[in-house]
Image (spheres, grey):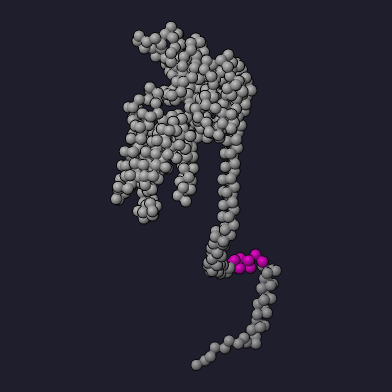
Amino acid sequence: MKVIAWVVLIAVLIPIQSVLLPHASVWGVTPDLGLIAVCLAGVLGGELHGLLVGIALGLVMSLFSAADPVAGMVIKGAIGYVAGLAGRHVVYLSPVILAVGILVTSCLAGLLTVSLLKLSEQQDLWWALRTIVLPQSVLDAVVGAVVYWIAWSRLNVERWMAEYRM
Amino acid sequence: MRMVNFRIPYNTGRLVLVLAAIFLLGVFLLPGQLQRVSEQIGGPIGWVLSWPLRTVSGLSNGVADLWNSYVALRGVEAENQELRRELEYLKGQNSQLRESAAATERLAALLEFKRQAGVSMVAAQVIGRDTGNWYRTIILNKGESDGFRPDMGVITPAGVVGRIVKTTAATSVVLLVTDPNNAIAGLTQRTRDEGIVEGTIQGTARLKYIPMLSNARPGDRVVTSGLVGGFPRGLAIGTITRIDKEEGGLFQSAELVPDVDSDQVEEVLVIEPSTVSSTDEIRPGASSVNPKPKSKP
């Protein structure tokens, strides 16, 4: 059942990221819904869950991008695993803590991407940090926190998390 | 105590008859005077009677208004709603027809270009953009099952859009000419100086490796040179806006404004590689030789 739910989520997430979000970009940058989903998958489901969802999302998202699929799988998988570890050690996860976590994770993932993708000479580290990594991290953190806050205020997330991990 | 007798006395009937006869006689003999008398008597009576009349009339009008405003207008309200719905439907239909007309115009231009170009091309639609922020790409609705392969050139009648870098069975990812990771062989149309066109981080393009002795200048058009596979010779890429010469450098470079606005592209043509060779050139009749800058496909 969980697998079907994640497959449906990925199937919905790709069109949103590829078709709808380019129309709502901020500073020419769109939030990475895949990264947010992987973070939430790790936090909710644990390391293994985060890793698997991360690898799957990294692969699927790279199919609709010029990015290297292996780099996508490695980065998203690592994010899911780290989010799972972090989720296991955090007793009380508030939207603010999650936002900070996503901000840091997105920054690290962006820097890792710059080094793995072998971009052109024009796209140096400072350019990447200034124009993509930092704006995207902020957007990821805001969107992730809002999504979690909605789930947190409307649903009993803590009970849900406990049941989900069983 | 004397009681009032309400009974009509015997002579009263006769008196009434006499008075009636006099009245009738007056009507026939003195009609004008009688009318004046009746008017004088009738005025105050009419004034007095007008009050209940007005009251009843007001009540009647009020009820009628109430009826017309609330009860009878229920039908009008429904009719209004129906008309509004019809208006919305017609507006939507009008919008769809306009969109269809625009699409027809674009597709007709694509077909005409395809017919004139002399190379085999397949039309495809843009269905999305890159899922990340690192590359400028568009996603097409056709892929390997339609014969699309990496390195195939993608164009519109306005000029070069980019190159396919990745395919799935049903989709293709096109790296745009404005992406810094893209490189296409190009030449200045007037001076015939060849170079490499690559994208910039500002979203424009740059023609690199122009010989130092070239007299290329702003306003010159840059087209594909056909030296590298994917594109035949003569497809429009962009217009030079600035020439950059470095002190002591071996080459100069030129900044270009691409002819195709990649944000506005909706339909494209993918060039089939078997029909492209370095000697092919887009026929002069094809619109890409002198397209309007930044025009829609």
Question: Within the magenta stretch, is there residue B32?
Answer: yes
> Residue B273 at x, y = what percent?
57, 22
| As drawn, B87 above or below A22 | below
In the rendered image, the vertical position of residue B184 relative to residue A62, given as above or below: above
- What residue is rendered at 37% in x and 48% in y? A44
x and y percentages locating residue B138 in the rendered image? 49, 31
* Residue found at x 42% / y 14%: B253
Give the residue drawn at x 46%, y 18%.
B197
Residue under the image location 59 percent in, 57 percent down: B75
Looking at this view, name the residue that lies furthest to the bottom: B1
The answer, for residue A94, to whether it is visible in the render is no
The quadrant where residue B59 appears: bottom right
Residue A24 colored in magenta in the image: no
The image position of residue B92, as x and y in percent, is 57, 42
Give the extent of the magenta segment. B31-40
Which percent across, then down, holds residue B272? 59, 24
Quarter occupied by the C terminus of chain B: top right
